[in-house]
Amino acid sequence: MKELSHIIIDNLDSAFIAVDKTGIILKYNKKAREMLKLNGEEGKNIDSLNALMPKGIWKDDVENIEILWENKGSKKHFIFQSIQHNDGYILCFKEEKRIKRANNDFYNNYSIDDIPGIDDNIIKIAKKSAKLNKHLLITGETGVGKEILARAIHKDSIRKGPFIPINCLAIPKDLMESELFGYEVGAFTGAHKGGKRGKIELANNGTLFLDEIGDMPFNVQGKLLRVIENKELWRVGATEGTKIDFQLICATNRDLKELVRKGIFREDLYYRICFLEISLSPLKNRIDYLDGLIEFFLNKHGGSNISFSNEAMKLLKSYLWPGNIRELEMVIELLVIDNENINDKIVKVDDLPLKIKSTDEKIPKTLDEKINVLKNREIRTTMIKYNSNITKSAQHLGITREGLSKYLKKHKA
């Protein structure tokens, strides 16, 4: 039975490494030899093999953390999990299908210059953030590509540590503090018996990406501010701090200035996180970049042999894309999946999703309709640029504040 279990483990798709309580490698399976380039590493410390993986991360009973592994000239991304048992830890490295299929995708290997759909000014600020290693705030609607840009900045930066993403809206408020800052042994009932490092500590020497920062609980904001200012982290229940160094990139689809005025978001934290700021416009205001984005997603999902008819492309450019770039990628991925049913590999109007085909009736036909579309697009773009500030937007557009307010009220914009 014991021999049978070894055969099963050797034939699993994931790489497994067994280490003792100090990190000494005891055994590993066949996939670990192949994927992690291991050969005769028994007896060595796991921390000595890979400088890109946070040291000691295997002690934290972590689950679904993205890490980089570099060994003998091979550099790969893995989803990492550590499982504690009486004699040590079982480390699992899983190369997901998403990562395999898109080896040169947004998440792993794309630099700032490789990302389509952003203008020269945004590229300039993004490169400055990567070079200066300063805190950055990225604003924009859901699905505009905020995390995509953050990952590219991390890749182009001098940071050698991991990219640790956190969605502040997805974590229950009562767990936010322990998730971010970690906790010591016996800090509270139900705490892991060995304590746990938080996401901030895992991001040491790397990049911490706080998505939906506007939804972070007010009491946690103050503790985050102290970490930023002092570069020192205090776990829950700790009697002393730990020095920490990371680049912070925050993102939100909310108006933080308005949240500050309402007393929901700390003003001092706001000015700390927006040393540099980027505002990503919705896709409907970046239609000029649509061809490049479509080509990018076709290549990403293995559809480089697919093209579009003029009529189909016209509809794609007329659709308002409420789900932004995320929705565009889903549409392209579905077309790639349905590749076999596309005649001559040319996407025609009938091949498009119903929601896009129905926009044919809404395409502006007359000159007045086309002018109104351009007018509305320019006003929306300007409002986003100035964070919905009507006075500044009106000045930029060369119209009165009253006139802009009247237009916004009439069109419910």
Image (cartoon, rainbow, N blue to C red):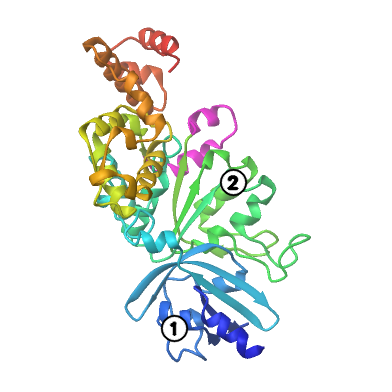
The residue positioned 35% from the left and 36% from the top of the image is 352
Q: Amino acid at mark 1?
A: Arg
Q: Secondary structure beneath disc 1?
A: helix
Q: Nearer the viewer, residue 358 or 101?
A: 358
Say which mark, if any, is on residue 33: 1
Looking at the image, tell me whether mark 2 or mark 1 is earlier in sequence order: 1
Query: Are circles 2 and 1 on residues that touch, CB within 8 Å?
Result: no
Q: Which mark is residue 224?
A: none
Expressed as whole percent of the image width and height from the top left, the position of residue 255 reads 48, 31
Q: Amino acid at mark 2?
A: Ala
In this rendering, the answer to whether 382 lies above or below 328 is above
Q: Quadrant of residue 111?
A: bottom left
| Circle 2 residues within 10 Å: few <14, some 14–19, many ≥20 | few
Write down the region rendered in magenta.
Answer: 254-277
Residue placed under numbered mark 2 in the picture: 170
Residue 268 in magenta?
yes
Q: Is residue 23 visible?
A: no
The quadrant of the image that shows the N terminus is bottom right
